[in-house]
């Protein structure tokens, strides 16, 4: 793991140094920094994705802008700062200065390479931010927080600046059409893999837990965005085997209790409270210090394979690792998703049992069933090795009115009337 991950990290930091060497210096540097801040502010203010990308394209020659975007959204760069130590009120300067931009880049290299850590890093950052002007503080702290809050992420940025941001991807499911959910149509039979395992479909929030060889725990969304504030989950994750990425979904703790009491008994009498499925999503990006949630893990991939996007183990082998290495730990905030035996597409009775299982889980409140190829390798894209069985309800509704937006949304459609 150490070699692949750190080779990639060294490569990205080499690019950072190259940017710094090329872009620092010259009489117009301060103008370029100010223009970058102005462009980011303009992007933040507009709501249209096309308008945001147009602003990026209008500033295609601004190298500072590209630097800030790269640093903020490169999912493989981590600065290991969990909380900004000082507020904007501590800023003591009024001018934007190129020397502080250079100092900022140098500091991020030290943080990312772990040359400066812990209290030393916090103290260095405090001194630096106190010497910034408010605009520098705003954008530099957002870079450190890995989110510029401009309504764009890697894919939107890459449409304007092709290939600037390395993308972060996970395995996504293809779907079995509603008319094929009986698994008895030619289309369904063509979709299904030969050897199948199933899991109930979780209506939670997709997360990855990276447990590095160093012991560091990093939690990301399916798009690579850092998620902070799950202190209990992070503590539990330190007990997971190091050097793996754990793929799963986080749900409300109350749902975990429901899982334990009802799924094991396959009860059809107790219906899951659907609000519990979505409750955790309302807290995922809040500023709470200790957000609650149970991480339902259904896959584990070695980090060195994750970095190079090449999986060597079948899903059945990875499931075996989960059951041998994670399940016995009996962690409070992490559970291994229950998985069926291996079914065979060639056996009609097996297919019948899968369909019955699907309806059973739907009846007790789950979204449906995940159908997985036991012989497949992990892929960083939407794949036919992972299928979802889900009932889809559609309805036509009449819009009776809307509120006009306020502030920057004045003159646009706002909150629906309820």
Image (spheres, helix red, strand yellow):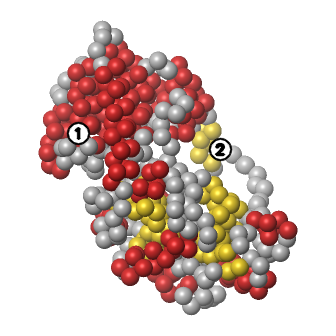
Q: Residue at x 43, y 27 (%)?
A: 66
Outermost residue on the right side: it is 186
Camera sees residue 52: no
Disc 2 element = strand
Q: Residue at x 43, y 71 (%)?
A: 294
Give the Cα distance between marks 1 and 2: 50 Å
Quadrant of res 124: top left
In percent of width and height, residue 241 lies at 35, 69
Outermost residue on the bottom side: it is 265
Depth check: give the residue in front, 231 or 370: 370
Disc 1 element = helix
In the displayed structure, does residue 168 sit left or right of residue 68?
A: right
In percent of width and height, residue 10 lies at 33, 40
**Mark identifier at residue 402:** 2
Quadrant of res 29: top left
In the displayed structure, does residue 392 sit left or right of residue 303?
A: right
Query: Pointer 1: what residue?
Result: 110
| Residue 178, placed above or below residue 164 | below
| Residue 187, placed above or below residue 310 | below
Quadrant where the C terminus is found in the figure: bottom right
Q: Residue at x 28, y 31 (%)?
A: 105
In percent of width and height, residue 389 lies at 70, 69
Q: Nearer the viewer, mark 1 or mark 2?
A: 1
């Amino acid at each position: 793991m150490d070699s692949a991950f750190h080779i990639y990290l060294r490569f990205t930091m080499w690019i950072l140094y190259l940017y710094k060497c090329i872009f620092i210096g010259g009489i117009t540097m301060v103008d370029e920094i100010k223009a970058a801040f102005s462009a980011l502010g303009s992007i933040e203010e507009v709501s249209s994705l096309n308008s945001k990308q147009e602003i990026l394209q209008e500033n295609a020659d601004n190298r500072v802008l590209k630097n800030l975007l790269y640093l903020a959204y490169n999912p493989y760069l981590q600065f290991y700062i969990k909380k900004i130590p000082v507020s904007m009120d501590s800023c003591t300067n009024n001018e934007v200065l190129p020397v502080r931009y250079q100092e900022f880049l140098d500091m991020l290299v030290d943080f990312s390479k772990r040359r400066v850590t812990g209290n030393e890093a916090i103290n260095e950052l405090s001194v630096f931010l106190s010497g910034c002007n408010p605009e520098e503080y705003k954008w530099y702290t957002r870079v450190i927080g890995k989110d510029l809050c401009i309504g764009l992420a890697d894919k939107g940025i890459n449409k304007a600046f092709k290939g600037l941001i390395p993308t972060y991807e996970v395995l996504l499911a293809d779907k079995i059409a509603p008319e094929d959910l009986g698994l008895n149509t030619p289309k369904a039979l063509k979709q299904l893999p030969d050897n199948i395992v199933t899991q109930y479909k979780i209506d939670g929030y997709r997360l990855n837990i990276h447990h590095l060889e160093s012991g560091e725990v990093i939690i990301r969304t399916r798009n690579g965005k850092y998620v902070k504030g799950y202190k209990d989950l992070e503590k539990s994750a330190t007990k997971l085997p190091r050097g793996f990425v754990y793929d799963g979904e986080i749900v409300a703790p109350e749902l975990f209790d429901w899982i334990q009491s009802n799924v094991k008994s396959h009860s059809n009498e107790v219906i899951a409270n659907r609000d519990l499925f979505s409750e955790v999503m309302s807290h995922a990006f809040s500023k709470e210090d200790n957000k609650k949630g149970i991480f339902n893990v259904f896959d584990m991939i070695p980090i060195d394979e994750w970095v190079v996007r090449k999986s060597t183990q079948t899903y059945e082998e990875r499931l075996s690792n989960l059951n041998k290495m994670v399940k016995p730990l009996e962690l409070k905030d992490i559970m291994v998703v229950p998985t069926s035996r291996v079914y065979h597409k060639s056996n009609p009775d097996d297919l019948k049992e899968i369909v019955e299982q699907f309806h059973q889980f739907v009846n007790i409140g789950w979204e449906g069933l995940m159908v997985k190829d036991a012989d497949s390798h992990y892929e960083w894209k939407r794949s036919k090795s992972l299928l979802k069985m889900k009932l889809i309800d559609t309805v036509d509704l009449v819009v009776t009115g809307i509120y006009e937006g306020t502030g920057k949304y004045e003159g646009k459609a706002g909150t629906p009337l309820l």
